[in-house]
Image (spheres, helix red, strand yellow):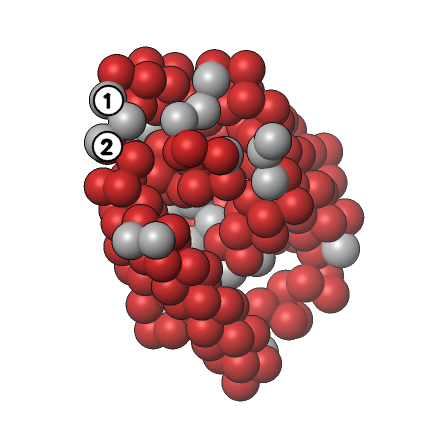
Amino acid sequence: MIDLAGFALAVLLVELTPGPNMGWLVTLTLAEGRRAGLGAITGIALGLAANAALSVLAASLVLAQDGGLTRAVSVLAAAMMTWLAWEAWQGAGESSPAATPRDGGKRHALAGFVINLLNPKAALFFVTVMPQFIPGGRPSFAQGLTMAAVSVTIATLIHLTLVLGAERVRGMLMAEHRALVVRRGLALAMLAVAAWFVSKAFA
C-alpha cells in the first residue's frame, strides 16, 4: 500500500522551501496582476505533471527489471534529500530549481511549462524519492501516477496561495531573519527524511 501521507510530507517540505517558482510568481503577480500569476501557475502545473509522468515511466520500467536496484535508489534518495537540505540551510533551497523566467510578455504559462518540464532536479527527486513510499520500492506505473498527482496538487496549492496572497507573502519572503529560521527548520526536517531513507536501504 502506498504511503501517500509520508510522500506528501516529503513533497511539502521541498515545495515550502523558497525558490525561483515562488519568487517569480510573487513578482509577476505584483507587477502584472493575479491573471498573469494564475496563467503562470497553469504552465508550472502542466510542466510539473509532464515531468512527473516521464519520471514515473522511467522509474517503473527500470526498477521493475531488477529488485537489487531498490537499495541503490534508497541511498540516492537519501543523498538527494541531503543535498536539498544543504541548499535550504545555505538559503538556496528551491521548489523548482531552474532559471527564473524574465519574459514580461504574455507567455508566462509557456515559460512555466518549459522550465518545469526540463527541470532535472525535479525529475531526480521524483525518481528517487517516490519508490521509498511503496512497499518493496518497485512502483507500478499506476502507483507512480497517483503519487505524481499528489505532488502536482501540493505544488499547485502552494503556488495558488502565493498568487492570492502576493502582497503579504512578499513581505514574508523578503524578511530574511524569518526566512532563515524557516529554511533551516525545513533543512533539518529533510535531513531526518534522508536518515530514514538510509535506514530503509540497510534494514
User: x, y (%) of residue 93?
Assistant: 40, 61
**In this rendering, position of residue 30 left or right of residue 128:** right
**In this rendering, position of residue 150 left or right of residue 49:** right
**In this rendering, position of residue 88 left or right of residue 6:** left
Nearer to me, 79 or 196:
196
Nearer to me, 132 or 92:
132
- Say which mark, if any, is on residue 66: 1
Name the amino acid, label 2: Leu
Residue 90 is drawn in which quadrant?
bottom left
**In this rendering, position of residue 131 left or right of residue 8:** left
Nearer to me, 72 or 36:
72
Residue found at x 22% / y 41%: 72
Residue annotated with mark 2? 69
Question: In the structure shown, which secondary structural element does the residue marked by tag 2 occupy?
Answer: helix
Q: Are marks 2 and 1 in contact (CB under 8 Å)?
A: yes
Residue 85 against residue 132 in the figure, above or below: below
Name the amino acid, label 1: Asp
Residue 91 against residue 151 in the figure, above or below: below
Q: Residues within 10 Å of mark 1 (few under 14, many from 20)?
A: few
User: x, y (%) of residue 142?
Assistant: 54, 15
Q: How far, Cα to Cα, is label 2 from label 1?
A: 6 Å
Q: Residues within 10 Å of mark 2 (few under 14, many from 20)?
A: some
User: x, y (%) of residue 102?
Assistant: 42, 41
Question: In the structure shown, which secondary structural element does the residue marked by tag 1 occupy?
Answer: loop
Residue found at x 45% / y 24%: 139
Residue found at x 63% / y 64%: 170
- Say which mark, if any, is on residue 148: none
The N terminus lies in which quarter of the figure? top right
Residue found at x 68% / y 63%: 169
- Does residue 125 appear in this view? yes
Residue 127 is drawn in which quadrant?
top left
